[in-house]
Amino acid sequence: MTTNVLVIGTGISGLTFAIKLASISPKTNIVLICKKDLMEGNTKYAQGGIAVVSNFKNDSFEKHMRDTMVAGDFKCKKSVVEFVIKEGVERLEELINWGAEFDKNLNNQLDLMKEGGHSTQRIVHHKDNSGFEIQRALIKKIKKFKNIKYLENHLLVDLITDHHIGKLPKTCYGAYVMSIKDKEIIKINSEITVLSTGGAGEVFEFTTNPKGATGDGLGAAYRAKINIKNLPYVQFHPTALQKKVNGETFLITEAIRGKGAKLTNSKGERFMLDYDKRGELASRDIVARAIANEMLKENLECMYLDATEIDTYTLKKNFPTILKKCNEVGINPLTDKIPVVPAAHYFCGGIDVDEYSRTNFDRLYAIGECSHTGLHGSNRLASNSLLESIVFSHRAAVDCLKKLNKSKLNFSFFKLIPEWNGKNSISNRELEVINKLRLNLQKIMSSKVGIFKTVDSLLNAEIELRSLYFKMLELYNKKKLTPQLCELRNLVSISYLMIKQSIEIKHNSGVYYNHDYAK
């Protein structure tokens, strides 16, 4: 298969990019690769919303910029922070014009929420399922374009680069992609390739991400020797529901704390003011560490979120999904405290890109959570991620079109790219081995490379992972590549790089905390 542009990943970043490019260039052929169906992905699970300055009476670009810098421990790239926040206003308006609906107040103005780390109310939302609404609107929009083709149930295996054909150094020519249904790997040649594959929450035992968040783009980029930066800066969401819902970890949005919910220990005592004067609305790194610390102090598996003092109307109006999910596991937030634990949530680092999402490889862009733009520094300000996605997707699409118009690829190159070389089939017994290796990896990363780390824990994790790597490599070299083995391969690659980069960090900042460097 050959196309002008290949987009791998169909969350808010991939869909926004495709819509923008298809709108301004109807003759450009675009192929979208979706790991499951179009609706599935991290975007769907985003509860909070988009942080955008819209009420200029009580808010300003300067306030939003300051909040972002403070949350990121001043490790953010200031120029990026400035243009993302300023351009976000127009991008949000565009998203609304595309059909996304956000809650309004009685004055028919956007109903704004406040989340941790924000100095004022600025979160544009759709109840407590904003990501679902955004994904719905984008999918409806994208189906109107004749020049966009999408392939559901397809998984990225590897990027095709100069390594495969020996032409034009540091250039990407598309990707090898697996049909999950047929278990066959196909070659997709492309003039431009865009990674929008999300993060890798499945590296850890507990994550708010869906099961498919295995860092496919990050793993492929690492193997292709593409620059990856700040991978150890993983944000743990402070409040995930301790009881799993249908086997999945469910996130409790911090907007509920913005409405007055309090964190308490087993005795019903608030503890956040002992850690930060902002209490429950401190930035996520501080709240997550505080909860983890209190759990260690009391030797308990959770702390508690008390929303019982919020009036019933407010809870039902703003947080219907939370009420529904809690009720499914026998908890009534109207009368009961919600048991919560921190869970891996968002990767602040990723594939290093410039202000137009260009990587260090020609014809390869990265957008969304798989990218490192410099916006987040060492900690993401709540709801800045969807903002980052719509701004950088727009910039990448505009730059991509310039690239296509300025420099066309000689399609004869594509004939030199080999087909994927398949191997022997894999048995059910070997699938069980893969699953056990994945669980073992998650335990290693959670216990030794999680919220709290030490120099020794990192070195021990490196040794244990090396052993796991050789077991995975033995399967990879002998057997046919399956979706399960492909995901394990990515998780091992990402874990190795995360440990390696963690060992190089000699001070604490934002979400990164090593006990040996504590003041």
Image (spheres, helix red, strand yellow):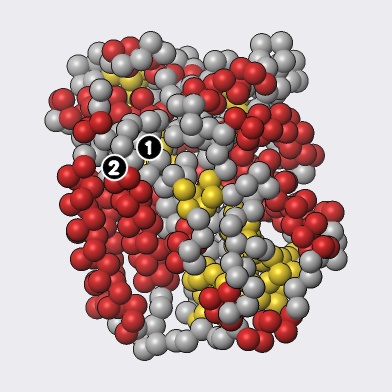
Say the numbered circle drawn on residue 329: none
Q: Which residue is mark 1?
A: 236
Q: Is residue 328 visible?
A: no
N-terminal of the two: label 2 or label 1? 1
Identity of the amino acid at label 2? Gly
Q: Which residue is mark 2?
A: 450
**Quadrant of the rendered image containing residue 344:** top left
Q: Position of residue 69 (x, y in %)?
A: 53, 25
Q: Are marks 2 and 1 in contact (CB under 8 Å)?
A: yes
* Residue most extreme to the bottom: 424
**Quadrant of the rendered image containing residue 373:** top right
Kindly identify the residue that appears in the image at 54 percent across and 15 percent down.
Answer: 119
* Residue most extreme to the front: 169
Measured in 3D between alpha carbons, the distance from the residue under mark 2 to the one under mark 1, in whole angstroms, is: 9 Å
Kindly identify the residue that appears in the image at 47 percent across and 41 percent down.
Answer: 348
Q: Residues within 10 Å of mark 1 (few under 14, many from 20)?
A: many
